[in-house]
Each structure stands twice: as C-alpha cells, then as structure tokens.
Image: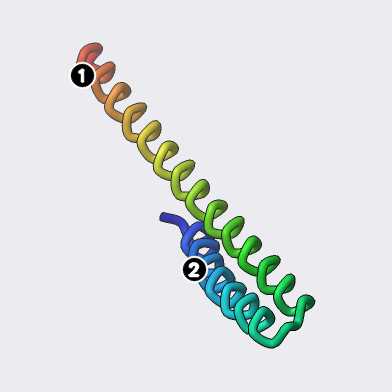
Amino acid sequence: MNNDATRNKAMGRANRAIGTARQKAGSAAGNAGMEQKGRDQHAKGEAEELTGKAQSAVQKAADSTRDAAGKARDKVKDATGR
C-alpha cells in the first residue's frame, strides 16, 4: 500500500471522529454553526477515507497487472528460449 493511501485513510478516520465530536458538541450547546462545521468535517473525513481506499485498490490492481505481465513474459521467454 502506498503512503498517500495510508495517509488519506488515517486522516479520513481522524476527521470523521473529530467532525462527529464537533457536531455533537454543537448540538448539545445549541450552536448550529459548530454543528454544521462538524458535519462538514465528518463529510471531509469520509471523502478522504474513500480516496485512500480507492488509491489502495488502484495500487493493488497495478501490482496484479504487473505480476501477470511478468509471468506472461517469463512463459514467452521459456517457450522461445530467449
């Protein structure tokens, strides 16, 4: 897994948690602005986490394709003696 994917997933989890806490604090205090900022931060965290998951999936697919291409190349070399 690449570092960007790991970082995005971690930041996403943190922003979701902080956003939820801000939202609840705003709700408890009757502060609509804080509550909205919490919802916004939670949504940002979800987007970051999904971005990290997508980056991981793309990297995994690229690795799988590279491995398959290497195996195919080796089979051709074995078959042709080159």
Where is residue 32, by image quadrant?
bottom right
Return the residue at label 1. 78
Which residue is painted at 70% across and 66% down in the image?
40
- Marks 1 and 2, the one that precedes in the sequence: 2
- The amino acid on which the numbered mark 1 sits, given as a three-letter code, is Asp
Compared to residue 54, the image places residue 70 above or below, namely: above
Residue 10 numbered tag:
2
Q: Position of residue 17 (x, y in %)?
A: 53, 74
Q: Position of residue 72 (x, y in %)?
A: 30, 22
Which residue is painted at 39% across and 34% down in the image?
66
Per the image, label 2 sits on a secondary structure element best described as: helix
Q: Relative to 42, is 36 on the left or the right?
A: right
| Crowdedness near tag 1: few (<14), some (14–19) or many (≥20) residues, C-alpha within 10 Å | few
- The amino acid on which the numbered mark 2 sits, given as a three-letter code, is Ala
Q: Residue furthest bottom?
A: 29
Compared to residue 19, the image places residue 73 above or below, namely: above
Q: On the rendered image, what quadrant is the N terminus found in?
A: bottom left
Q: Nearer the viewer, residue 71 or 34?
A: 34
Q: Position of residue 25 (x, y in %)?
A: 63, 84
